[in-house]
Image (spheres, rainbow, N blue to C red):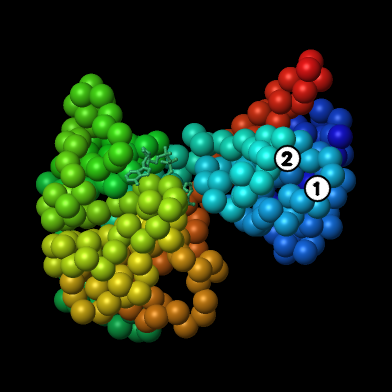
Amino acid sequence: MKALIAAPIHRDAVKLLEDAGIQVTYKEYPSEKELSELVVDADILFVRSKPLVTAEVISKAKKLKIIARAGVGLDNIDVKAAEAKGIRVINTPEATTRSVAELTIGLMLAVARKIAYSDRKMREGKWVKKEAEGIELRNKTLGIIGFGRIGREVAAIASKGLGMKILYFDVYRVSPEVERELGAAYVDLETLVKESDVISVHVPLTPETKGLISESLLRMMKRNAILINTSRGGVVDTKALIKALKEGWIAGAGLDVYEEEPLPPNHPLTELDNVVLTPHIGASTEEAQERAGIDAVKKVLELIKEFKQE
Ligand code: NAD
């Protein structure tokens, strides 16, 4: 069997694959054209949040049986087109949860305490002690939109570690036991937006969540509130967010994901001092990548066993 690895996968995971007798080809983030050519004789395709696996790519695959996403989001894969061809699509939803949650907390602190701003000014030789006055997070209200794996992990760290009050909104309500354990209260979206000092977004990108953080929602936020997005760029209306940050409808934002990635050079967001930007590194930790790669390979090897039994 042949595996095409089209994104960096942890070395221990690649070894596991090779030890199972699978022939591995590696091409990091190929273009759609390159991937269409490389995928022709692959049985298994490994990706992360990139490259794009379009219907066009899938139409070129002659032997493909499995697309394995080391990580969570499947928005770079045309799952419908894959399933229509009988290709199984798997991911490793739990592997990256802790890393994304920790980055989320890091961004909250970086914005609240103006850490990135202070660092930039220090390097310019400026001692901005007054301008860099921030706020504490203890006793502040954190509103979590999307209370799945990452949202709940953020809630646990923020409530137990930082003493924040937690509000959450989701299409599903968690059990009263989980709410009690996390000290979280379920509210409607409008209440969450109006009452939170920090809002953190953890929904998947779907037609329903596209642009969910809209201009009208940003205008409803407290003027001293902070928005954090480590989910998907498309969930936030970027133009409206830039207006909100420039015109002071909100105090600041921390972003790991963007409508267009990589974020183009000289993007208006890069000119604002009250926003902290990271280049989609939520899942980029040694631990998360090891778990994601190994979980993905284990799932693939299980599926191959199943195929052989059929
Ligand atoms: P999850 O599926 O466990 O949780 C998502 C939650 O959102 C679910 O509880 C779901 O019910 C809720 N939801 C879906 N649609 C909704 C809607 N319209 N309104 C309200 N709630 C809605 O997913 P997760 O593992 O917690 O991941 C959350 C997000 O984080 C995803 O967008 C994922 O792509 C992103 N992510 C980012 C990185 C990164 O590197 N920054 C890494 C991993 C995951």
Q: Position of residue 135 (x, y in %)?
A: 16, 60
Q: For the point 27% across and 46% down, which residue is it?
A: 144
Q: Identify which amino acid the numbered label 1 is placed on.
A: Ala
Question: From the viewer's perspective, is residue 3 above or below residue 113?
Answer: above
Q: For the point 23% across and 42% down, which residue is it?
A: 168
Q: Which disc, if any, is residue 206?
A: none
Q: Disc 2 designates what residue?
A: 85
Q: Identify which amino acid the numbered label 2 is placed on.
A: Lys
Q: Position of residue 171 (x, y in %)?
A: 30, 39
Q: Which disc, if any, is residue 61?
A: 1
In this picture, residue 11 sits left or right of residue 135: right
Q: Nearer the viewer, residue 26 or 304?
A: 304
**Whereabouts is ligand 1, in terms of quadrant?**
top left
Whether residue 283 is visible to the viewer of this picture, yes or no, is yes
Whether residue 39 is visible to the viewer of this picture, yes or no, is no
Q: Are marks 2 and 1 in contact (CB under 8 Å)?
A: yes
Q: For the point 79% across and 62% down, which residue is it?
A: 34
Question: From the viewer's perspective, is residue 131 above or below residue 90?
Answer: below
In this picture, residue 95 sits left or right of residue 22: left
Quadrant that contains the N terminus:
top right
In this picture, residue 189 sits left or right of residue 42: left
Q: Nearer the viewer, residue 82 or 218?
A: 82
Q: For the point 70% across and 59% down, which residue is it?
A: 29
In this picture, residue 33 sits left or right of residue 77: right
Q: Does mark 2 have its CB less than 8 Å from ligand 1?
A: no
Query: Which callout, 2 or 1, points to the residue nearer the camera?
Result: 2
Q: Residue furthest top?
A: 309
* CA neighbours of label 2 inside 10 A, class few (<14), some (14 to 19), many (20+): some
